[in-house]
Amino acid sequence: MDINESVATALAALGHATRLSVFRLLVRAGDEGLNVGEIGQHLNMAPSTLAHHLKALVDAGLVRQERQGRQIVNSVKYDAMHQIVSFLTSECCIGVKLTQEDAA
């Protein structure tokens, strides 16, 4: 998968309000992450609903899940988050010029 596809997949996952709320909560939680029950308490959501949205975030490469004893702890893949932000801002304000080739 090239970088455009990877970023598009991640942004599509974040394009859902619930997943965006979960992701932002996990960003605030830091490297320690949160288990599904903790996420549910913070966002007032049922575990089954969260499991569906967490799977989408994991599949998009934005969240990792790690078993700690009997719990699954979810945390942000900060390298992926930084890659997306970098991709979106890498050509900021460099200008755009239409060439003859672009017009064809």
Image (cartoon, helix red, strand yellow):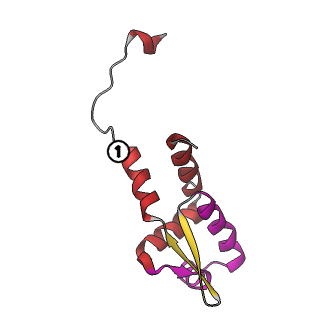
Q: Secondary structure at mark 1?
A: helix
Image location (x, y in percent) of residue 18: 59, 65
Task: State which region is magenta.
Answer: 32-60
Quick check: is 93 in the magenta stretch?
A: no
Instruction: Please state which amino acid type lies under the numbered disc 1.
Output: Thr
Quadrant holding the N terminus: top right
Quick check: is 58 in the magenta stretch?
A: yes
Q: Residue at x 33, y 20 (%)?
A: 97
Above or below, 27 relative to 93: below
Q: Residues within 10 Å of mark 1 (few under 14, many from 20)?
A: few
Image location (x, y in percent) of residue 38: 56, 85
Give the number of callouts: 1
Q: Residue furthest right?
A: 48
Q: Quadrant of residue 103?
A: top left
Above or below, 101 relative to 59: above
Image location (x, y in percent) of residue 99: 37, 13
Q: Quadrant of residue 30?
A: bottom left
Q: Quadrant of residue 58?
A: bottom right
Above or below, 12 relative to 32: above
Image location (x, y in percent) of residue 68: 58, 86
Above or below, 25 relative to 80: below
Does residue 80 appear to the left or right of 38 in the view shown?
Answer: left
Q: Which residue is mark 1?
A: 89
Residue 101 or residue 40, whichever sits in front: 101
Q: Residue at x 53, y 61 (%)?
A: 62
Q: Residue furthest left?
A: 94
Residue 22 or residue 75, whichever sits in front: 75
Which secondary structure is most common in the magenta stretch? helix
